[in-house]
Image: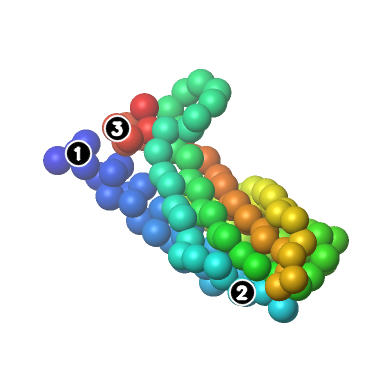
Amino acid sequence: MLIMIPVWRDNARFDDFRERVLAYPLPPETRSKSDSETTFGKMSGGSGDYCEYQVRLMLQTGLSQKEIWAHYGKAAIAGADDGEKVEVRLRFGEETGDGRAVIVEFGDISPSDWDWRCT
């Protein structure tokens, strides 16, 4: 039973992290192109037992890259452990007649404490 406690705790951390990300408002002139994608598991690089939390949003916007950077640059979203601010990465597609595609990725890591998904 003790082994399961870190799993439940990490599930709750992940759910809370995802909720905080999704609660952050979209920029003006921006809409979601699809449901958010979420991933949780072993950190893909580095060493040690760390869990990696990621939420990816696929958006369509009429704003410039500079405006999108400004909007997400001021996002004060707490990470998985409610501590440091999450890392935000942006990728921009080509501009089309209905705006530009933007992928916004929010990520964080935390120690795993024996969660088998992160070791």
| Kind of residue indicated by mark 1 | Leu
Query: From where the camera sits, is residue 23 visible?
Result: yes
N-terminal label among 3 and 2: 2
Frontmost of labels 3 and 2 is: 2
In the picture as drawn, the residue positioned furthest to the bottom comes out as 28
Q: Position of residue 98 (x, y in %)?
A: 71, 73
In the picture as drawn, the residue positioned furthest to the front comes out as 97
Rendered residue at 74%/71% (across/down):
97
- Image quadrant holding the C terminus, namely top left
**Mark 3 neighbour class, 10 Å CA radius: few under 14, some 14 to 19, many 20 or more:** some
Frontmost of labels 1 and 3 is: 3
Task: Left or right? Give the position of 68 relative to 20.
Answer: right
N-terminal label among 2 and 1: 1
Q: How many marks?
A: 3
Task: Left or right? Give the position of 116 relative to 20.
Answer: left
Q: Quick one: SS at disc 1?
A: loop
Task: Left or right? Give the position of 51 relative to 6.
Answer: right
| Kind of residue indicated by mark 3 | Trp
| Kind of residue indicated by mark 2 | Arg
> Is 6 or 56 nearer to us in this picture?
56
Q: Position of residue 48 (x, y in %)?
A: 47, 23
> Is 11 or 45 nearer to us in this picture?
45
Q: Which residue is mark 3?
A: 116
Rendered residue at 39%/59% (across/down):
15
Q: Position of residue 18 (x, y in %)?
A: 47, 60
Q: Which residue is mark 1?
A: 2
- Image quadrant holding the N terminus, namely top left
In the picture as drawn, the residue positioned furthest to the left comes out as 1
N-terminal label among 1 and 3: 1
